[in-house]
Amino acid sequence: MESMMIEMENLVKQFPHTNAAKKKTWKTAVAGISLSVRRGEVFGLLGPNGAGKTTIIRMLTMQTQPTSGMIRIDGQNLSRDGRSVKEQIGVVPQHVNFDQELTVWENMELHARLHHMGREERVARIGELLREMELTEVQNDNVRRLSGGMKRRLLIARALIHRPQVLFLDEPTVALDPQIRRHIWDLVREIAKSGVTVLLTTHYIEEAEALCDRVSIINKGELIDVQTPQAFCEVLGIYAVEWDEEDGHAYRFFHTREEARAHARHIEEVHGRVLLRPTNLEDVFIELTGRKEGL
């Protein structure tokens, strides 16, 4: 039997809401989601902005309480064993939340003290993480002077200070340029290789495709499906044929190259230019949600 690190059962989150008629009601951000994340895997929550991804992360990391449902991390129920679970998880928030008046080292030191680490252990662990994140040269610099990429790496280092078993990353590369984004991807891969279970949210489809062992597609607070990126594409068809028609862009998916080529030749005779390419997770996302957001 597979060992599950994170389990969610019928998770619901509702917020008070006043509608256009000024009537007080409830807005559902997460609508009965059930998911399990295997020990040691990189698992992605993929969806457009406003899909409910951050709300799920906030419930998993005890920053907000579910309206209903159950969460277990490493077999421990969050509602009962919250204090114990906190020692097993690290959190990288979407927005930078350092003490801007402190240096890189001082921010790390502060977080280590919060986890009751002794002086020798603190010094060794901070030094180790700053080397891994290539931040040693700026360890005495004020945090506000760091670049966006450096701040993101420092957030990851801080989350790993107490050697958590699970790392939560909320939109880890948002607003970063492509080169820095790929550097963060390399860091996430190395963290996963060390045995840490990683759950990340993203609206970048290429990020989910590059990093995740499995991906869940979330839309309007609901779970659409869970698969490996490859399995999603195989179900849809691994080859895509695209062309332009008078009323817009058209495409079809095929399970074999021969079928795709035959259709492409036919389309080329009728419409002219045609593109035959491998199916990707973006195609799956659009087919399942009807949305082309965050791409």
Image (tube, helix red, strand yellow):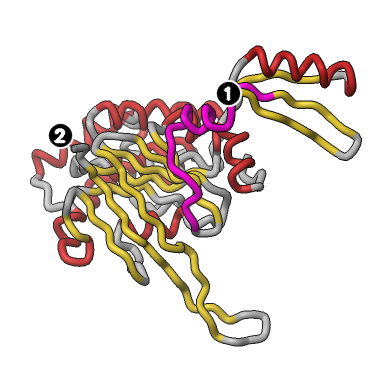
Q: Residue at the spot x=36%, y=61% of the render? A: 10
x and y percentages locating residue 103 in the rendered image: 33, 45
Q: Residue at the spot x=45%, y=71% of the render? A: 14
Based on the picture, tell me whether residue 224 belongs to the magenta stretch: yes
Left or right of 267, for residue 98: left
Q: Which residue is mark 1?
A: 238
x and y percentages locating residue 228 in the rendered image: 43, 32
Q: Work out whether residue 266 can be spotted.
A: yes
x and y percentages locating residue 57 in the rendered image: 38, 54
Q: Nearer the viewer, residue 36 or 211?
A: 36
Q: Which residue is mark 2?
A: 124
Please tell me the numbered disc located at residue 163. Answer: none
Q: Residues within 10 Å of mark 1 (few under 14, many from 20)?
A: many
Q: What is the CA distance from the residue labelled 2 to the residue labelled 1?
A: 48 Å
Residue 2, picture quadrant: top left
Q: Work out whether residue 113 can be spotted.
A: no
The part of the chain drawn in magenta is 222-240
Dot 2 or dot 1: first in sequence order is: 2
Q: Residue at the spot x=40%, y=66% of the render? A: 12
Q: Name the residue type under label 2.
A: Ala
Residue 37, picture quadrant: top left
Q: Residue at the spot x=58%, y=32% of the render? A: 236
Question: Of discs 2 and 1, which sits in the foreground?
Answer: 1
Give the SS element for disc 2. Answer: helix
Give the SS element for disc 1. Answer: loop
